[in-house]
């Protein structure tokens, strides 16, 4: 569905991303890991065209991303970026409905269908009674779930999520990951998720990609990528690895 | 949706009432029932073109303000405060000095001046970290004062008799209204309403954030050019006809948002009608408050607008 081939991204003179490749096919969930400044968000921005690649190419459903109009790209790829603030009071429902932009005409008043899609997305993110609340009066975690609801409302099959659970409590962290996992398993979605929670990544993702200083350090299943040696090298933290007794998946415990 | 339609109807009725009242009120009493030769001349040659021009100027400036605010994500963006009106004023003056009475020269040069000022203030205000409120306002102040000094330089080169007319005009003055000026601003205001309304949904997304809008399918660069272009045409034609009437683009969209919320599909067209009402009423006050002498309408709008600006800045 989405493929990045040897892409590099530059800010001014320095490469923030060097020759990284990534392939995302239907039903797959890829976790993007790495310390701050490793290039995770840059890669995500390159994957939807926000940042142009200085070298390499991004291919979406068989066509170079650069050839698609913004509308076409937005109907296929939804992004949950890190937080943004607006100075104008926008209701939660209006915010989620903005995700329907790529489906509407230019003058664009929403149709009944747009509203029902938005309401369903809100319900899926545990936000049933939030429609008339104002965005700037919500807590960080509530806002984050609204932003995810908007991504679902776009009906795009590819989700690019930049730390979607950073401000969430445990229950909602699990809810979001289960929701994305479920969409991948049953509805042909695919997702790239940036997270700092190695255990959530090991638990839910099919593939883990570990970035370090703008380059690809390791990629593959959790068992290969999350070795104690890799974690020590990339994060500079000693850790212990065992298996989660409940699920049998890799579990990392940092040693402080 | 019902409620928005009622507000539209109310605004249109309000505009009709304001137009009629403004045509009947003035330092010279004009009776429609016993029309004298002199009364007819005052009504048709002076008052009606002035009132109609005021309505179009108000609509244009409010449209430009509402759309710039959404585009720049800043409730304080306003053509006068950003220096766009001064750019248009300088263009008009240059046309007058260099080209004299060549037909169409003033509005075209006013548009060019507005467009250049818009571009300059945008380039100054944006930084890699985005655009914050203070930076935009400061850039506007710098552009405004810079252009003002050039305008002062130019007007001091003009001879004294013409100078007096220009100082009045610079403050925003509708007393030189003509039917031709009215037709041109009417065309601009009507086209501006349609073009900007067509971008209103994209503006709703831009208001949330530029990157956000891009992610959801908005051609950000194209929308920016359309808004800047339309705002420059609107401000250019207004200023060429009536000088820099300030704060209309700040006051009117602010009040509209208080009533209908921040959906630009309502805010943009409603601001056009409300702006027309506002300037027509302000100019009626300007004509009658110290009759038989007159105030420039820009003095009245600034009297209301400046305190509101301070209030909005403090609340930010």
Image (cartoon, coloured by chain):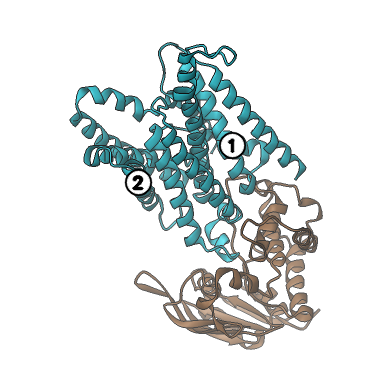
Chain colours: A brown, B cyan
Q: Are marks 2 and 1 in contact (CB under 8 Å)?
A: no
Q: Secondary structure at mark 2?
A: helix
Q: Chain of mark 1?
A: B
First along the sequence among labels 2 and 1:
2
Q: Give residue A29's position: percent from left, percent from top.
A: 68, 79
Real-space Cα distance between discs 2 and 1? 25 Å
Q: Which residue is mark 2?
A: B108
Q: Give residue A242's position: percent from left, percent from top.
A: 70, 82
Q: Quadrant of residue B157?
A: top left
Q: Which residue is mark 1?
A: B273
Q: Chain of mark 2?
A: B
Front position in the image: B27 or B268: B27
Front position in the image: B29 or A160: B29
Q: Secondary structure at mark 1?
A: helix
Q: Quadrant of the N terminus of chain B?
A: top right
Front position in the image: A214 or A71: A71
**Do the residues at discs 2 and 1 belong to one chain?**
yes
**In the displayed structure, would residue A161 be above or below residue A242?**
above
Q: Which mark is residue A111?
A: none
**In the displayed structure, would residue B10 be above or below residue B265?**
above
**In the displayed structure, would residue B234 be above or below residue B199?**
above
Nearer to us of marks 2 and 1 is 2
Q: Give residue A17's position: percent from left, percent from top.
A: 46, 77
Residue name at image x 57 percent, y 46 percent = A87
């Amino acid at each position: 569905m989405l493929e990045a081939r040897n892409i590099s991204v530059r800010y001014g003179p320095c490469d923030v991303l060097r020759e990284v490749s990534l392939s995302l096919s239907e039903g797959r969930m890829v976790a993007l890991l790495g310390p701050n400044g490793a290039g995770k968000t840059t890669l995500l921005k390159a994957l939807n065209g926000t940042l142009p690649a200085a070298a390499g190419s991004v291919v979406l459903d068989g066509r170079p991303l650069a050839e698609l109009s913004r509308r076409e790209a937005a109907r296929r790829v939804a992004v949950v970026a890190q937080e943004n603030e607006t100075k104008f009071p926008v209701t939660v429902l209006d915010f989620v409905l903005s995700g329907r932009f790529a489906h509407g005409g230019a003058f664009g008043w929403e149709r009944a269908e747009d509203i029902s899609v938005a309401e369903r997305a809100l319900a899926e993110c545990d936000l049933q009674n939030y429609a008339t609340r104002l965005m700037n009066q919500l807590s960080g975690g509530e806002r984050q779930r609204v932003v995810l609801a908007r991504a679902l409302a776009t009906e795009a099959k590819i989700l690019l999520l930049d730390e979607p659970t950073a401000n969430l409590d445990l229950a909602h962290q699990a809810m979001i990951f289960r929701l994305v996992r479920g969409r991948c398993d049953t509805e042909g979605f695919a997702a790239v998720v940036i997270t700092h929670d190695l255990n959530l990544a090991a638990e839910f993702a099919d593939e883990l990609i570990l970035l370090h200083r703008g380059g690809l350090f390791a990629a593959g299943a959790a068992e290969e990528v999350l070795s104690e040696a890799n974690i020590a090298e990339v994060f500079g933290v000693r850790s212990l690895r065992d298996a989660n007794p409940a699920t049998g998946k890799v579990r990392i415990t940092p040693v402080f | 949706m019902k409620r928005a339609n009622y507000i539209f109807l109310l605004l249109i009725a309000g505009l009709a009432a304001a137009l009629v009242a403004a045509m009947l009120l003035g330092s010279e009493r004009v009776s429609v029932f016993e029309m004298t030769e002199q009364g007819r001349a005052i009504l048709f040659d002076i008052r009606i073109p002035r009132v109609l021009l005021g309505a179009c100027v108000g609509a244009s400036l409010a449209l430009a303000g509402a759309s710039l605010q959404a585009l720049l994500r800043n409730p304080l963006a306003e053509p006068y405060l950003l220096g766009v009106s001064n750019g248009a004023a300088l263009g008009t003056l240059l046309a007058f000095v260099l080209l004299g009475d060549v037909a169409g020269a003033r509005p075209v040069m006013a548009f060019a001046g507005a467009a250049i000022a818009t571009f300059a203030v945008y380039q100054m205000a944006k930084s890699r970290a985005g655009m914050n409120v203070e930076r935009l306002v400061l850039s506007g102040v710098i552009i405004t004062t810079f252009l003002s000094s050039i305008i002062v330089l130019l007007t001091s080169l003009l001879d004294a008799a013409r100078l007096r007319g220009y100082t009045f005009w610079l403050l925003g003055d509708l007393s030189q209204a003509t039917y031709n000026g009215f037709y041109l601003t009417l065309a601009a205001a009507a086209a501006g309403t349609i073009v900007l309304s067509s971008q209103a949904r994209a503006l709703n997304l831009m208001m949330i954030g530029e990157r956000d809008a891009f992610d959801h399918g908005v051609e950000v660069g194209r929308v920016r050019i359309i808004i800047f272009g339309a705002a420059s045409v609107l401000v250019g034609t207004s200023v060429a006809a009536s000088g820099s009437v300030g704060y209309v683009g700040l006051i009117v969209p602010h009040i509209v948002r208080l009533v209908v919320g921040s959906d630009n599909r309502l805010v943009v067209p409603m601001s056009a009608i409300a702006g027309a009402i506002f300037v027509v009423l302000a100019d009626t006050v300007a004509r009658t408050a110290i009759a038989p002498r007159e105030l420039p309408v820009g003095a009245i709008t600034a009297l209301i607008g400046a305190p509101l600006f301070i209030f909005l800045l403090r609340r930010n």
